[in-house]
Structures are given as structure tokens and as C-alpha cells.
Image (cartoon, rainbow, N blue to C red):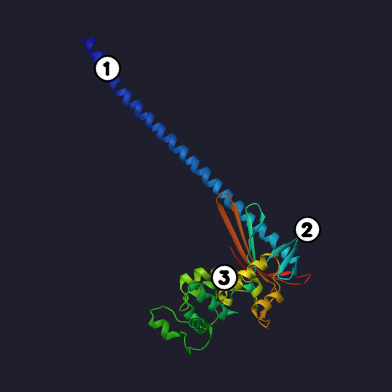
């Protein structure tokens, strides 16, 4: 009798043991998988941080390299003649054509005389804004609203906007009546929509040359200001072949040099650096004023990280 009872108890214990063992195995497996995922995530984070750090250092190193090359370079027409580390010379373009400085590092240089500033050439900026918007009939409005935003009086221009126009449109602000403090402020000016700003932003510069240089403008700016696509295509081809000079430009367009409209580099150069390491990206944009002085070869006018 006692033997039968003992056998029954043993069988019952065996029935519970298997689920317990399976449960413990599942728990151990889950913990192992969790630890594996945490480890992978930590490794991925560490790799990402390493890549970001390397991209940041590459961008800073490239900017230092470019600043030194600019400081020791000379202007060759509308190009920058640079002496490289191995003693050879290169011509760097000043109209935004990208080139590779090192593995994963891309550089773009632009003479700010070929760009557009709300401070120094607001009328040309308004013409470009009207062009990218596809609405040529708003050119006068954009010229007047930008002027009203920056002048110190409260008198409205014919197509402009002062306090009343902003308040009646529901805007929670009125014109600054002073110069724009940064390019993004342009979106507050009546008529300059976020969509227009998005199409303009690569052409905008805040600190830069007070003069314009048609020879270092990009194709979009030429199309906006010259309004002759065939002429623009010819100019683009000539510039790519290195044949575009101040004289040939004047002969083709009829545009002459003036006090504020020069056909030579301004000395104010926007440098855009982009560094890539794996999936990490880092970029720096600065405006450098190149001076022909031994003790002060350049000045940094702006720096954006």
C-alpha cells in the first residue's frame, strides 16, 4: 500500500518538473536575448558616436585646411589659385561647384558677390525671389515690402507694407524698421513665404561683399536676372571651359561695370564643408574675408555649425 502511494507521488513530481525546466529555460533565453540586444544597441551607439566624432573632426580639419589655402592663395581672374601640400597649384571655382578635398569631405566655395544679401542688394534679391516663386508680377511688391521692413520710417511704399498691413493680416508682429538680423527673418516679411525662402536659402548670404559679381553667380541667379535661357546656357558652357572673362561677359550681355557691380572677386568667400563618415554627417559654413596683408591674411565674418 505504501509502495503504490510513493509511486504516485513520484509520478506527480515528474509531471511538474518538465514545465518548470521549460519555464526556466525560456527565462534564461529571454535574458540572454535581451542582453544580446542591449549589447548590440550599445555597440551601435558607440559606433555612431565614434562616426559622429570623426565626421566632426574631419569637418573642422577640412575648414582649417581650406582657410589656410585661401589665406595663401591668389586670385586668377574669377578663380582662386591655390598651392596644395605637394607644391602643385589648383584653380578653385568661386561659384559653388563642389569638389572633394579628402575622402568623405566635400567643399563648396562661393564669392559672396555672386550671392544675394538683404542688406547690400535687396532689389536683386527681390527679383530672384519673384523668379523662384514663378510669379514675375510680384517683383515690385517684394522690393517694396523688404524696403519697408528695413527702413526706419512708418511711411508705406506703393506696393509695400507697414504696421497696418501686418496687423490687419493677423500677424503678431510689425516691421522691424531696421536691417534683418539673420537670413531666416526674411520669412516674416510680407510676400516672402516659407516656400520662397526654401528655394532662396542657398543663394542668401548675410555678411558679405557690398558689391555684386555676375561672373560668380550660379545658373539660377543668371536665369533670374538675365531672363534669357539661351544666353545663360552659353555662359554656363563658357565658364565650364574656362573661357568666360569680364570682357566676354560684357560683350554678350551688355552689362557694364559700375561702382557696385564689379566683374571680379570681392574677397568675401563663403566656405561650405560637408564631412561624411559612415552614416554620420557634419557640416560647417563660414564666410571668410581674404585680405592681402601678411599679418592679417583673412578674417572670419560668420560661422555656422
Q: Residue at x 44, y 34 (%)?
A: 32
Q: Neighbour class for label 1 at 10 Å: few (<14), some, many (≥20)?
A: few
Can residue 180 be seen here? The reply is: no
Q: Is residue 216 above or below residue 30?
A: below
Q: State which quadrant residue 85 falls in.
A: bottom right
Q: Neighbour class for label 3 at 10 Å: few (<14), some, many (≥20)?
A: some
The span from disc 1 to disc 2 (Cα, nearest Å) is 90 Å
Quadrant that contains the C terminus: bottom right
First-in-chain label (3 vs 2):
2
The span from disc 3 to disc 2 (Cα, nearest Å) is 33 Å
Q: Secondary structure at mark 3?
A: helix
In the picture provided, is 37 more to the left or to the right than 123? left
Q: Secondary structure at mark 1?
A: helix
Residue named by callout 3: 220
- Name of the residue lying farthest toward the bottom: 155
In the picture provided, is 125 more to the left or to the right than 30? right
Residue 273 on image: x %, y %: 62, 60
Q: Is residue 165 above or below residue 75?
A: below
Residue 111 on image: x %, y %: 66, 70
Residue 215 on image: x %, y %: 66, 73
In the picture provided, is 233 more to the left or to the right than 167? right
Q: Are marks 3 and 1 in contact (CB under 8 Å)?
A: no
Residue named by callout 2: 88
| Front position in the image: 56 or 24 | 56
Q: How many marks?
A: 3
The span from disc 3 to disc 1 (Cα, nearest Å) is 87 Å
Question: Which mark lies nearer to you, 3 or 1?
Answer: 3
Residue named by callout 1: 11
Q: Residue at x 51, y 69 (%)?
A: 199
First-in-chain label (3 vs 1):
1
Q: Secondary structure at mark 2?
A: loop
Amino acid at each position: 500500500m505504501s509502495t503504490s502511494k510513493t509511486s504516485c507521488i513520484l509520478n506527480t513530481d515528474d509531471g511538474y518538473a518538465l514545465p518548470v525546466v521549460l519555464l526556466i529555460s525560456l527565462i534564461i533565453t529571454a535574458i540572454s536575448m535581451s542582453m544580446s540586444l542591449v549589447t548590440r544597441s550599445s555597440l551601435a551607439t558607440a559606433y555612431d558616436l565614434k562616426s559622429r566624432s570623426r565626421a566632426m573632426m574631419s569637418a573642422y580639419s577640412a575648414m582649417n585646411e581650406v582657410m589656410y589655402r585661401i589665406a595663401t592663395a591668389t586670385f586668377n581672374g574669377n578663380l582662386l589659385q591655390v598651392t596644395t601640400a605637394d607644391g602643385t597649384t589648383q584653380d578653385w571655382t568661386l561659384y559653388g561647384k563642389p569638389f572633394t578635398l579628402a575622402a568623405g569631405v566635400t567643399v563648396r566655395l562661393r564669392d559672396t558677390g555672386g550671392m544675394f544679401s538683404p542688406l547690400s542688394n535687396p532689389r536683386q534679391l527681390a527679383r530672384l525671389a519673384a523668379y523662384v516663386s514663378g510669379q514675375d508680377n510680384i517683383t515690385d511688391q517684394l522690393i517694396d515690402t523688404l524696403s519697408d521692413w528695413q527702413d526706419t520710417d512708418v511711411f508705406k511704399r506703393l506696393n509695400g507694407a507697414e504696421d497696418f498691413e501686418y496687423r490687419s493680416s493677423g500677424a503678431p508682429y510689425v516691421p522691424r524698421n531696421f536691417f534683418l538680423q539673420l537670413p531666416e527673418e526674411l520669412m516674416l516679411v510680407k510676400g516672402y513665404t516659407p516656400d520662397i525662402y526654401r528655394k532662396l536659402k542657398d543663394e542668401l548670404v548675410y555678411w558679405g561683399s557690398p558689391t555684386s559679381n555676375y561672373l560668380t553667380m550660379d545658373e539660377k541667379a543668371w536665369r533670374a536676372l538675365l531672363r534669357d535661357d539661351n544666353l545663360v546656357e552659353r555662359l554656363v558652357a563658357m565658364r565650364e571651359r574656362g573661357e568666360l572673362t569680364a570682357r566676354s561677359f560684357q560683350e554678350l550681355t551688355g552689362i557694364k561695370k559700375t561702382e557696385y557691380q564689379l566683374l571680379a572677386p570681392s574677397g568675401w568667400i563663403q566656405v561650405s564643408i560637408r564631412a561624411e563618415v559612415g552614416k554620420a554627417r557634419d557640416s560647417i559654413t563660414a564666410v571668410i574675408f581674404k585680405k592681402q596683408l601678411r599679418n592679417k591674411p583673412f578674417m572670419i565674418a560668420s560661422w555656422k555649425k
